[in-house]
Amino acid sequence: MTEQETTEQETMNQEVKNEEVIESASEEALEKTSEETPNSETPEANELSSDDKAQDTSENNEYYGAPENYDFKNLELPEGITIDDKLTEKFTPALKELNLSQKSADKLAHLLAEYQQAQTENAEEQLAEFKRQEKAALKMSYEKMLNSDKEIGVDEAQRNAYIDVADVGYKAFANDDFKGLLQELHLDYHPAVIKHFYRLGKLCGNDKILSSSTPQVPEMSRAEILYPTNYDNK
């Protein structure tokens, strides 16, 4: 074998060796990558999945599983809202049909209580608004009656003069509580009330009504007091 042939043979051997090294390195890299990548079919993955299922089951157990009896007596509810035995008895069949636990039932009870409270507040606001409108309508009706009353005066000047006299009686005879009641019901605009205080105001201008005197009783002797019949014909 010549020197040239020997050199070519050594080169070929080196190339084969390099290919073997590359192939070996590639296999090692694949094995390492396989070890680092989680396999869903490995026992570790299965174990994590079991834990997740157990956690889900535990959480579900808190919300499902109907008790023998539902009890809302110790449940903290908004002020003025209660869940009595009658209401509990009414909702129990539906709760049991849904297989709800006491915790789930408590949550529903809170929602029901909040809804009931909102409805109550809304009803109270509507009632208050209705009362305001009713009082405003009464005031308008009284004012209309007042302006058309012939005794008080259809003419504005005559009517004002009449009301001035009524105001004298109003201030003289109505105490603060009575004034507050009349104003609350808008009765201070009612013609009948104004006429009443007009007459009292007219009386306030008469000094005789403001001073009363005790009738004079003639003096009587003891005998006249004890035996009045003996002195009737005197």
Image (cartoon, rainbow, N blue to C red):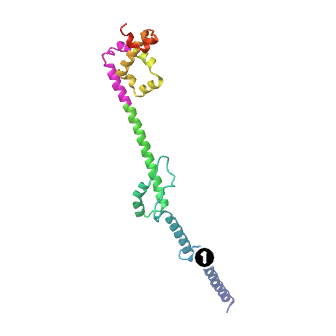
Left or right? Give the position of 179 relative to 20.
left
Give the residue pinned by disc 1: 35
Vertical position of residue 76 compared to residue 33: above or below: above
- Residue 144 in magenta? yes
Picture coordinates of residue 41 (x, y %)?
53, 76
Q: Residues within 10 Å of mark 1 (few under 14, many from 20)?
A: few
Residue type highlighted by circle 1: Glu
Left or right? Give the position of 10 relative to 206.
right
- Quadrant where the N terminus sits is bottom right
The region drawn magenta spans 135-164
Residue 39 appears in view = no
Vertical position of residue 36 compared to residue 84: above or below: below
Picture coordinates of residue 46 (x, y %)?
54, 74
Answer with the quarter of the image where residue 199 lies.
Answer: top left
Picture coordinates of residue 226 (x, y %)?
43, 15
Label 1: state its secondary structure.
Answer: helix
Report the front residue among 181 and 149.
Answer: 181
Vertical position of residue 216 compared to residue 189: above or below: above
Which residue lies at the image location 56% right of the left edge and 74% below the top edge?
Answer: 47
Vertical position of residue 158 compared to residue 3: above or below: above
Report the front residue among 15 and 58.
Answer: 58
Report the front residue among 48 and 144.
Answer: 144
Report the front residue among 56 and 162.
Answer: 162
Picture coordinates of residue 28 (x, y %)?
62, 79
Which residue lies at the image location 41% right of the left edge and 25% below the top edge?
Answer: 182
Left or right? Give the position of 154 relative to 35.
left
Which residue lies at the image location 31% right of the left edge and 18% below the top edge?
Answer: 149
Residue 137 appears in view = yes
- Quadrant where the C terminus sits is top left
Answer with the quarter of the image where residue 159 lies.
Answer: top left
Which residue lies at the image location 31% right of the left edge and 15% below the top edge?
Answer: 151
- Residue 179 in magenta? no
